[in-house]
Image (spheres, rainbow, N blue to C red):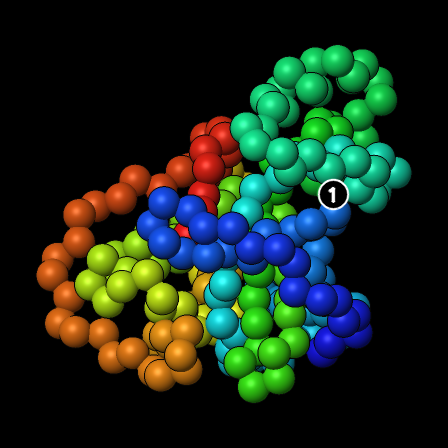
Amino acid sequence: MMNERTSLPATSSNDDGFTPIMPTDRVITGTLIKYLDGVWSESDITIPVGTKLLALSTHQVIQRWQDGRVVETISTKPLPDPDELNAQIPREQWEVDRNGNCRPPWQLTYVIYLLDPSTCEKFTFANGTVGTRIAIETLADRVAWMRRMRGSNVLPLVELSAKPMKTRFGTKQRPEFKIIEWHSLGGAVVTAPEQPALPSVKLPSSEEDMDDEILF
């Protein structure tokens, strides 16, 4: 699945002791993978069902789209307000999305970096949909709970899957990072203990804004 090899970018630690992989001069590290209507793909080739990868870290950027491609990316924190950036661009210059709606040029994009534990091939998934936000927030919440119990050096092995989500257009399939097991940075598999009941976490609806920081 790997068609592009790059060196590991620089790393930096955040407050919980986790050392995330962060992009240097571009967002994509390794191979870009895509998700559409329940199907994961890479270079227009369907990724086999049941593919499992280590989730390394998440990131947020703001990207400007033009003629169906990204022409500018802002990754410096704190990120500017995309609504303020879009207000500076006349609406007649906005493009139309696949649902026939005007799409603001500047979009908040959620990024997750993944690794094949067998080959160390690197992958990036980047998207600005509500479904992507829910998938990444759900994964980040579970990582945070596991690290409270097992320490900050555990990483989830996730299966690229899909999960139904209610939207104003009906039920759609959103991306899902299904946790299969946990690995420590030393390579050992971590078996989760019996978990206490978790507090309820309010996830965003399809109408809610997407402007909060997600890191794990």
Q: Which image quadrant is residue 70 in?
A: top right
Q: Is residue 80 left or right of residue 7?
A: left
Tell me the residue that label 1 is attached to. Answer: 98
Quadrant including the N terminus: bottom right
Which residue is painted at 70% across and 14% down in the image? 87
Task: Identify the residue at the far bottom of this view.
Answer: 118
Is residue 96 shown left or right of residue 144?
right
- Would you place residue 119 above or below residue 61 in this image? below
Tell me where residue 31 appears, x and y as whole percent: 72, 66
Left or right of 52? Residue 148 is: left
Q: Position of residue 109 (x, y in %)?
A: 61, 42
* Residue 186 pos. (x, y %): 40, 79
Residue at 45% across / 71% down in the picture?
158
Foreground: 65 or 31? 31
Position of 100 relative to 138 (above/below): above
Give the image location of residue 174, x and y in percent.
52, 55
Residue 125 placement: quadrant: bottom right
**Residue type, label 1:** Arg
Residue 198 seen in this snapshot: yes
Circle 1: element type: loop
